Amino acid sequence: MLMEKNNQHYLEQVANTKMPYGKYKGNFLIDLPEHYIVWYNNKGFPKGKLGDMLRLVYEIQLNGLEDLVRKLRTS
């Protein structure tokens, strides 16, 4: 049960985190254009938590699950 709660918390963080720099600065990670996430996948994701989150966004978009994650966004 604890692991499920941590996973949901992490998905909520991904849903509510904005891109901190670049062309898409200020956009929610889950709303970044697919071509941009694919570019990062090919180039290499940044190190650290942001890279981990972008990697997860790539998997989410690959499987068409963006809308489920968007529902976790807080107002």
Image: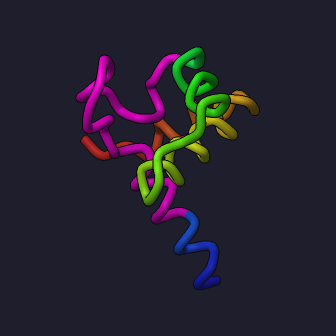
Vertical side of 45 occupied by 28: above or below:
above
Left or right: 36 in relation to 15? right
Left or right: 69 in relation to 75? right
Left or right: 64 in relation to 36? right
Taking the spot 50% from the left edge, 17% from the top edge, the residue there is: 33
**Magenta stretch: residue 10 in it?**
yes
* Residue farthest bottom in this picture: 2
| Residue 49 image offset from top left, x and y in percent | 43, 58
Taking the spot 60% from the left edge, 31% from the top edge, the residue there is: 43
Taking the spot 45% from the left edge, 24% from the top edge, the residue there is: 32
* Residue farthest front in this picture: 43
Q: Quadrant of the N terminus?
A: bottom right
- Is 69 in front, or is 49? 49
Q: Please name the colour scheme applied to the rendered image.
A: rainbow
The picture quadrant where one finds residue 37 is: top right
- Is 32 in front, or is 68? 32
- Is 41 in front, or is 28? 41
| Residue 36 image offset from top left, x and y in percent | 52, 20
| Residue 48 image offset from top left, x and y in percent | 44, 59
Taking the spot 53% from the left edge, 63% from the top edge, the residue there is: 8
Vertical side of 74 occupied by 1: above or below:
below
What is the span of residues highlighted in magenta in the rendered image? 8-33
- Is 37 in front, or is 60? 37
Q: Quadrant of the C terminus?
A: top left
Number of callouts in the render? 0
The picture quadrant where one finds residue 4 is: bottom right
* Residue farthest right in this picture: 63
